[in-house]
Amino acid sequence: MREVTISIPNSDFSLFQRVMHKLGWKYTEVASVKDDSKEEVMASLDRAFAEFHQMQKTGRKGRRAEELIDEL
């Protein structure tokens, strides 16, 4: 069995559901994830590196990754 991810326009979703039902195939809806544009990713990285360099200059210590994960 294979797993496939597709994007279907809202206007065609009912047709997709009928076809899947007719074929006896199962499907699962998942929330779509917004893809960040290259510009957004680069801006985010620029901010992160600027903060990192500021921390190095001031001697400020960052938080351990475990602490950040525990907050999630």
Image (cartoon, rainbow, N blue to C red):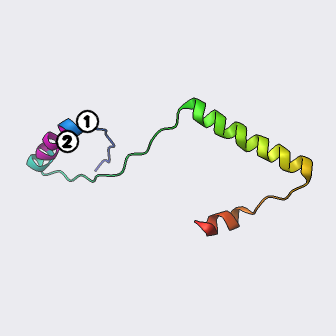
Residue at image point 11% right, 45% down: 18
Left or right: 12 in relation to 47: left
Task: Identify residue type, mark 1.
Answer: Pro
Specify the quadrant that holds the C terminus. bottom right
Left or right: 64 in relation to 40: right
Measured in 3D between alpha carbons, the distance from the residue under mark 1 to the one under mark 2, in whole angstroms, is 6 Å
Residue 57's place in the image compared with 68, above or below, is: above
Point out the residue furthest to the left here.
22
Locate residue 24, reporting x and y percent: 12, 51
Q: Are marks 1 and 2 in contact (CB under 8 Å)?
A: yes
Residue nearest the observer in this picture, 39 or 22 = 39
Residue at image point 84% right, 50% down: 55
The image quadrant that residue 4 belongs to is: top left
Disc 2 is placed on an element classified as: helix
Point out the residue furthest to the bottom here.
70
> For the stretch drawn in magenta, what is the main secondary structure?
helix
Locate residue 44, reporting x and y percent: 65, 40
- The residue identified by callout 2 is 13
The image quadrant that residue 49 belongs to is: top right
Locate residue 41, reporting x and y percent: 60, 36
Looking at the rendering, the stretch of residues picked out in magenta corresponds to 12-19
Residue nearest the observer in this picture, 18 or 59 = 59
Q: Residues within 10 Å of mark 1 (few under 14, many from 20)?
A: few
Residue nearest the observer in this picture, 67 or 24 = 67
- The residue identified by callout 1 is 9
Left or right: 11 in relation to 33: left
Residue at image point 59% right, 30% down: 39
Left or right: 67 in relation to 11: right
Res. 31 mark: none
Task: Identify residue type, mark 2.
Answer: Phe
